Amino acid sequence: MEEEGFLAFDSSGMKNLKTSVVLDFFDQPLLLHAQDSVGTNFLCVIAETPNGEASARYLCVAISPAKLNAYLHGEVDLRAIFDHPEADEWYITDHGKAVDVEKGFAIIPVAREQLQRDWLPSEGAFYSLPAVSADEIVNETREQRTAVIRLSLDPPESRIEQRILATHLSELLLNFQLFVKHAYLKSFSDGSRPQREAKHSPASELEVFAISPGSFTVHLRSREDADMYGHAEVGRALRMLDEITAEVDDPEKALIVLRRNRGRVATAYIRLLETIVRTESPLSYAWATPELAVPQVRRITTRQAKPLFETLSRVKDLGIETKTLVGTLVSADSVKNTWTLRGEDKRYYKGQVHPASRITMGVGGFTLGRKYRFVCDEIVREIAGTGSESTHYLLISSESLS
C-alpha cells in the first residue's frame, strides 16, 4: 500500500551506490558524487526531507566523467545536468530507507512524469571551489620563508588520465609569470620605488618547488624571501591580480579595472585569458605570505574567460600605455620617421613618430647627442611561439633638456 504523501516507484531497476565524496554540506549532505558497482558516476542532490523522516531523499542522475569534470570546474550548472541527464534517466532514494552516506544506499528509477519541480536544484547553481586549507598553505609559506602560490591547471587531457601537454603546462605557467612580473612593476607607478630598481628585483620571479600528487597543482614561490615581519614584495602583484579577477563574472566591470592598469598588465591578463580559452583549461590559484593568516583564492573557468576575453580583446587601447623616456638622441631618420634614444638607464629605446603627430624626425628639428624627454605610446606585442615580447614606442611629443 502506498503511504500517504508519497508516490510509488518501480523498484525493478534498483541500483546500489556508494558515496565517493560529499560535494556540498550544510547541516547534512546536500550534494553527493557516488558510483555504482561497475564504476558509473552519479550526482545526487537532496530532494526533500519529509516530515517525521530522519533521512533526506536524494534525486540522482548518471553522469559521464567529462560532464562531471565540466561541472566541478564551473563549466555547466547543476540544474542543466538534472534537467537533461545524459542517459535520460532519473533515480531517487526510497523514502522508507535511510541514506547512509558512508556505507552506501539504494536508488530506484523515477519516470519523467513523476518528477516534482521542487526536487530539482536551482538554476545557475555552479559548483563553488572548496576552501583551501589555511593551515596547510600558510605553513608552506613559513617553510619557504616567502610568498607561496598554488596554481591549479585542468586541461581536457588531464581529466581522463594523469597527463598534461607540455605546451599547455608551459604556456599557462609562462603567461601567469608574465602577468606577475608586469603587475609587480606597475605597482610602483606611484613612485614609491624607482621602476628601474624594481625591474631587477627577484621578487616577481617565480620558482616551482613542488607539485601536488594526483593533480596538476603547481606550487610556486617568490625568488625573494620575505622580510623579518613576513612581508613578501610579490604580494603587490598578487593583490592586483585579485582585484582584476574579482570581476571575472562581469566583463564591463573588469574593463573598468583594466583601464586603470592599461599597457603591459592588461595585455598580460588578456593573454592569460586567451590561453585559458584556447587550451580549455580552467585555472585556479591560492596564495599567501608568512604574514597572512588566510589564503586568497580565485578561479577563472572557461565559461567565465570566453566572454571576458571577447570583450577585452575588442578594446584596442587597453594594451597601450603612455611612457616618458629621458635620454640622449643617438639616431633620427627623417624618411622613415624613426629614432633611437639612449635612456638614463643605459638602455636603447627605438621607435617611430606617432601617425597622429606632426613631429618630423630630422637633423633640422632634432640634434643628435642632445638630451630629450620623449612622451610615447608604449605597445607590447608577443613574439609568436616564443613567449617573449617586443616593445614599440610611438612618439607623441618631445622636449629638449639640453
Image (cartoon, helix red, strand yellow):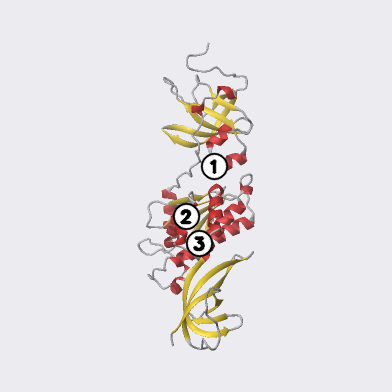
* Mark closest to the chain's N terminus, 2 or 3: 2
**Amino acid identity at mark 3:** Ala
Determine the secondary structure under disc 2. Answer: helix
* Mark closest to the chain's N terminus, 2 or 1: 1
- Residue at image point 43% right, 23% down: 54
Q: Nearer the viewer, residue 43 or 113?
A: 113
Q: Is residue 62 above or below residue 177?
A: above
* Mark closest to the chain's N terminus, 3 or 1: 1
Image marks 2 and 1: residues in contact by CB distance under 8 Å: no
Identify the residue under disc 3.
266
Q: Nearer the viewer, residue 105 or 180?
A: 180
Residue 285 visible in the current orientation: no
Disc 3 crowd, CA 10 A, few/some/many (<14, 14-19, 20+): many
Instruction: Measure how far apart labels 3 and 1 are at the Cα level.
Output: 28 Å
- Residue at image point 51% right, 82% down: 342
Q: Which mark is residue 364?
A: none
Residue 57 visible in the current orientation: yes
Instruction: Measure how far apart labels 2 and 3 are at the Cα level.
Output: 10 Å
- Residue at image point 54% right, 82% down: 360
Q: Which mark is residue 72?
A: 1
Determine the secondary structure under disc 3. Answer: helix
Query: Residue 101, percent across and down?
Result: 50, 30
**Amino acid identity at mark 1:** Leu
Q: Nearer the viewer, residue 105 or 340?
A: 340
Instruction: Measure how far apart labels 2 and 1 are at the Cα level.
Output: 24 Å
Query: Residue 154, percent across and down?
Result: 58, 49
Identify the residue under disc 2.
254
| Foreground label between 3 and 1 | 3
